[in-house]
Image (cartoon, rainbow, N blue to C red):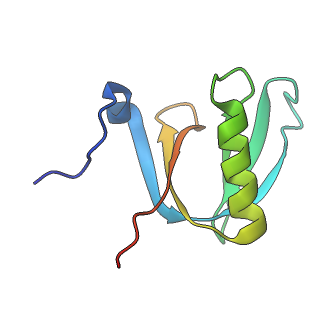
Amino acid sequence: MITSCSGSSSSQNLTWYNNSVITNVAEDPEKPEEFTRVSIGISPQIFYLSKKADDYKILLEKTSHSHKKGKAYNIGIEKNTNVIKQMNEIPSTK
C-alpha cells in the first residue's frame, strides 16, 4: 500500500499532521531572531518555522493563511526538532 507520493527522501524524517489548522502564529519569545512559533489544533501543540530556511517566506504565508482563514493543510514536522518542513494543500475530493 502506497501512503505517500512525495519524491523527497527527506519526507521519511517527517511526522505528518493531516487536515490541520494553524491556531496561532507569533515570534518565538526565546529565540525571536531564529524562529516563528506556530500552534496547531484546538488543544495547541507548539511547532516552529526556522527563519533561516530557504522556504521560510512560503511557509510563513501558508501558516498565516491557515490561521486567518481557517484553511487546513497537511503539515510535515521534522522528527526530533518540532520544525515545520512542509505544508501541503489537501487534495479536493470532488
Q: Position of residue 60 (x, y in %)?
A: 72, 43
Residue that protrudes farthest toward the left in the picture: 1
Quarter of the figure that contains the C terminus: bottom left
Q: Residue at x 78, y 66 (%)?
A: 68
Q: Tag count in the figure?
A: 0
Evaluate whether residue 48 shows in this view.
no
Q: Quadrant of residue 44?
A: bottom right
Q: Is residue 7 visible?
A: yes
Q: Which of the 4 image quadrants contains residue 24?
A: bottom right
Where residue 82 appears, as percent x and y from the top left, is 58, 38
Residue at horizontal 68%, vertical 61%?
A: 66
Above/below status of 87 relative to 22: above
Q: Residue furthest bottom?
A: 94
> In the displayed structure, would residue 62 be above or below residue 57?
below
Q: Position of residue 35 (x, y in %)?
A: 77, 31
Above or below residue 84? Residue 41 is below
Please name whichever residue, 91 or 80, is drawn nearer the observer in this view of the structure.
Answer: 91
Residue 31 relative to residue 77: left or right:
right
User: Is residue 41 found left or right of 60 in the rendered image?
Assistant: left
Question: Looking at the figure, which quarter contains the N terminus?
Answer: bottom left
Q: Name the one closer to the observer, 26 or 57.
A: 57
In depth, the one of 91 and 34 nearer the eye is 91
- The picture places residue 53, in percent across and down from the top left corner, at 65, 23
Left or right: residue 3 versus residue 53 is left
Residue at the spot 76% in from the left edge and 43% down from the top edge: 37
